[in-house]
Amino acid sequence: MRRIDALVRGMPQLWMMAHEVIVRSTRKLVKRLSGPVASDADRSTAMFGDWYASVLPWRPRHVAFLVSETPLLPVMVPPAPASTLLERFAIQLAAVLRRHRVDQTVIPAECSGTVDYRVGATEPQRAGVNE
């Protein structure tokens, strides 16, 4: 929680901007997600940086596991239907940030409709997720 608090205090100028969030996923998940494609050079402009996503095969149902690049904040979301995964991710991220007692002025800026998501494949040498 301290890393998140320090990050929030260190970047107040980002709170009011529209953000572009890059979600780097396994190839299998990228095929299922809808949205503009991100190149390897693209980087998120949001406070938490790029997000890395994979689907974990848990029982009784699978879970989409997303981790932010900067504070390594984990967020879990049901992966189905994949067409709405990114919208549901934003809702779950807001809930996680509230549980971490992040300043209420930061949450809408990171999770609102002003956030544009772009989807790209993981960079195998950087991401610790299985294809």
Image (cartoon, helix red, strand yellow):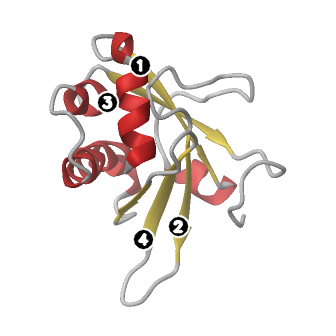
| Residue identifier under label 1 | 11
> Circle 4: is it few (<14), some (14-19), or many (20+) Cα within 10 Å?
some
Asked if residue 5 lies left or right of residue 29, the reply is: left
| Residue identifier under label 3 | 110
How far separated are the C-alphas under marks 4 and 2?
6 Å
Asked if residue 108 lies left or right of residue 117, the reply is: left
Circles 3 and 1: CB distance less than 8 Å?
no
Front-most of residues 72 and 84: 72
| Residue identifier under label 2 | 55
Q: Amino acid at mark 3?
A: Glu
How far separated are the C-alphas under marks 2 and 3?
23 Å
**Which badge, 3 or 1, comes first in the chain's sequence?**
1
Residue 67: mark in rendering: none
| Residue identifier under label 4 | 63
Q: Residue at x 30, y 42 (%)?
A: 90
How far separated are the C-alphas under marks 4 and 1?
31 Å
> Circle 3: is it few (<14), some (14-19), or many (20+) Cα within 10 Å?
many
Residue 53, image x and y in percent? Answer: 55, 54
Residue 124, image x and y in percent? Answer: 80, 52
Nearer to us: label 2 or label 3: 3
